[in-house]
Amino acid sequence: MKTRRTGLAMLLAAVMSVTLLAGCSGGGTETAASEPAATTNETPAAEATTGEAAAEETKLADGNITILYHTSKEQYDENKANNPEAYDAVYETIPQFESTYGGKVTVIAVPWGDQKPTLISMVNAGDQVDVAQANDQNFPVYPLKKIVQPIDPYVDVSDSLWNGAVTNTFTFGGKPYAVGTSAAPIVMYYNKTLFENNGVKTPSEYYAEGSWNWETFRQVAMELTMDTDGDGKNDQFGFGWWDAGYPLYVASNGKTIMSFNEDGSITTNYETENVKEAMQFAQDALLKDKFIDAEKEGDYFIGEFKNGKLAMTAEYGFAGFNVFKSDYEIDFVPVPTGPKGTTDAGPGGLSGWSIPTASKNPEGAAAFIQMMSENEASHALEHNANNFSQERVDLMNKLAGNILFTPIGVEKYWDANGAAMTGIKDGTPVGTFATNAKNLLEEGINITLTQ
């Protein structure tokens, strides 16, 4: 389980360089992400500061910077040859940056899993590295070990270009360590044809009237769970996703598994009412309401949805239109709101850009991050506007700014998550496994803070 989730989480930052619509599903309690289609904040492209205009305001004494990245230029060129729509903001920005500011941009490309140890080694050795990615796997270790520095001395974090959810996510001890423009809300995709053929009110209709919540989700999921071939066993189900959707319910009920506090401490939320309600809902869906196929695990839901045997599933951003492409008409709505949640606030994936403490040119790093992010935002806005209705783009952008997401780079996170999921599937009382998960995670947090 850990290997699968970690591998999928690795893909999040890859798509934050905006490889659009190349989705594959995956998940974890803190929404460790798969390849979502990128969405941006609501800043119109026309309002974004251009790289040339920024250059007039920012005079760099040194245009030489080094970037630690997970993709080589050769890999990107190959991706581009195979998919002309592929877009990597890092490599697309380098020529513009060098032309605007002079100097040389050097990219050190290492496999995704080697980024964290490589950056730590480089910083400890005093090697120049000016730009690095911030993601769910390397925080809070980076700020704890002083691998990256607060970014607000070099970047105006209040600029409307930045997605506020990204800034908030990578704030530790009250200081922001990363900024970014991209976010991937997880949304609920549904088989519109299946709903209409069975005379069931669609999620979009419930959402339009302001009543798309756990109860209406449960109601339609149960209505569309049935035996369609008469063998006495259900073969069509209302919903399916990783871990019975447990990650979705946690965020849609107003919490994340951990909270990063202004004093630098980290607290667990397993025993909060929000999280316990989410775990109970997931357990009931599997064992009581049975609108999820408890006999299947993994990514089975992709094929089931495409084959018309699953009414609803989930995916990051617009990627579902590619992942679930079939003969059926599909659409999406936000994840249904929990009893303690807020409408349009919920799960998703985020990543950002940081300036390491070993940077020899933090001003140059900030200028590159700004230029790259403007390019990324403009490209995503144009691409989405050309491929999806404006109504869908507006909704996705609204959700992108309200993502509840917490980095999971602490010891024993996956042990705690495994304890919770085992309890959900086994029917163990929620209070029992919530306490077990909390104790495991608190032990891991203590190790992470003191190692």
Image: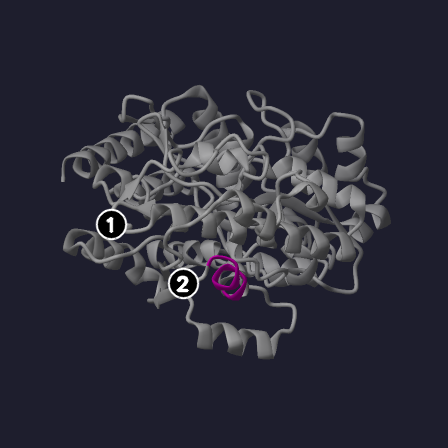
Taking the image as shown, residue 433 lies to the left or right of residue 117, namely right
Tell me which amino acid carries mark 1.
Ala
Percent across and percent down for residue 382 are: 72, 54
Closer to us: 196 or 112? 112
Whether 281 is drawn above or below 6: the answer is above
Q: Secondary structure at mark 2?
A: loop
Residue at position x 15%, y 56% in the image: 125
Point out the stretch of residues depicted in magenta.
95-101
Closer to us: 23 or 413? 23
Percent across and percent down for residue 185 are: 58, 43
Percent across and percent down for residue 292 are: 58, 46
Q: In what quadrant of the picture does the C terminus appear?
A: top left
- Figure coloring: one colour
Residue 410 visible in rendering:
no
Taking the image as shown, residue 438 lies to the left or right of residue 403, namely left
Whether 185 is drawn above or below 34: the answer is above
Earlier-in-chain disc, 1 versus 2: 2
State the residue position of label 1: 358
Percent across and percent down for residue 65 are: 36, 58
Q: Mark 1 or 2, which is nearer the eye?
A: 2
Neighbourhood count class around disc 2 (C-alpha, 10 Å): few under 14, some 14–19, many 20 upward: some
Residue at position x 51%, y 33% in the image: 251
State the residue position of label 2: 103
Neighbourhood count class around disc 1 (C-alpha, 10 Å): few under 14, some 14–19, many 20 upward: many
Residue 439 picture quarter = top left
